Amino acid sequence: MAEIQKKIKICPNGHPYDPSRFESCPICSNGGFAPTLDPFAPDSMSATVDPGQQNMGSFAQTAPPDSGYQNQHYMPESYSQFTPTAVPEVRYSGRMQETQSVDPSTPAGTSSPVVGWLVALDGPCRGTDYRIRVGYNYVGRTNGDICIHGDATISAERDCSVTYVPQTRGFYIAHELGKNPLLLNGKPVIREAELKTYDRITVGSTSLIFVALSGEQFDWSES
């Protein structure tokens, strides 16, 4: 072991080599390796990196602290020409009357048949009748399946709803988004209630009377 250590030489860059096989350090002769630094040497803490090598490799340049990118990802100038991908604008329609309820007895593409009516007894639309169809019928001032125009005390859409369920042949009324109480025969409807023919409904300041066509005596599935 002692003989081997005597034959080993250390080049000025700290690389060990065998002088009996190489005239000079083979590592330094190839020029492909950086000098070996002793981490415990007194001058190792003062070693500096060539500034020209700081931007080598595939990593982006580090932004200086006063560049205004402290809270963003720094992008080099070569990337600044790319255009961000535009996000398509999504628009929603409030016209709920375009959605048709599903009635198994109705041919595809046609409106479901009338199953009842609401008739205005007073207010701006006095005498107007409104058709009720299978499923949910949303009542509003400007949008919905049933629009009662001119009554500012009715919400623009989904003030309440009138529903016909063909499976049970029953009608129901429910409070939706209306700010004013929904009354059925003078009593408030907190959630929902069953409707019977000639029931009186108050929506906003408009009174309506309910008349059923479908029910125990008739349903479109029998015709």
Image: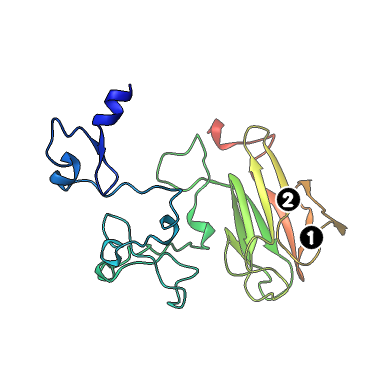
In this rendering, does residue 195 appear at all? no
| Circle 2 residue | 173
Indicate the amino acid at tag 1.
Leu
The answer to which of 223 and 158 lies nearer the viewer is: 158
Indicate the amino acid at tag 2.
Ile
Vertical relation: 150 (above or below) 184: below
Kindly indicate whether the residue at mark 2 contacts the one at mark 1 (C-beta within 8 angstroms).
yes
Q: Position of residue 4 (x, y in %)?
A: 27, 25
Q: Residue at x 28, y 24 (%)?
A: 3
In the rendered view of the protein, which quadrant contains the N terminus?
top left
Assign a secondary structure to mark 2.
strand
Vertical relation: 68 (above or below) 93: below
Label 2 neighbour load within 10 Å: few <14, some 14-19, many 20+: many
Q: Residue at x 28, y 49 (%)?
A: 35
Is residue 99 rendered to the left or right of residue 16? right
Is residue 201 rendered to the left or right of residue 8? right
Is residue 52 rendered to the left or right of residue 127? left
| Circle 1 residue | 182
Q: Position of residue 215 (x, y in %)?
A: 67, 38
Q: Quadrant of residue 76?
A: bottom left
Q: Residue at x 70, y 51 (%)?
A: 211
Q: Residue at x 47, y 39 (%)?
A: 106
Q: Position of residue 102 (x, y in %)?
A: 51, 41
* Sequence-earlier tag: 1 or 2: 2
The answer to which of 55 and 203 lies nearer the viewer is: 55
Vertical relation: 85 (above or below) 151: above
Give the spatial CA distance, label 1 vs label 2.
9 Å
Q: Position of residue 34 (x, y in %)?
A: 26, 49
Vertical relation: 68 (above or below) 197: below
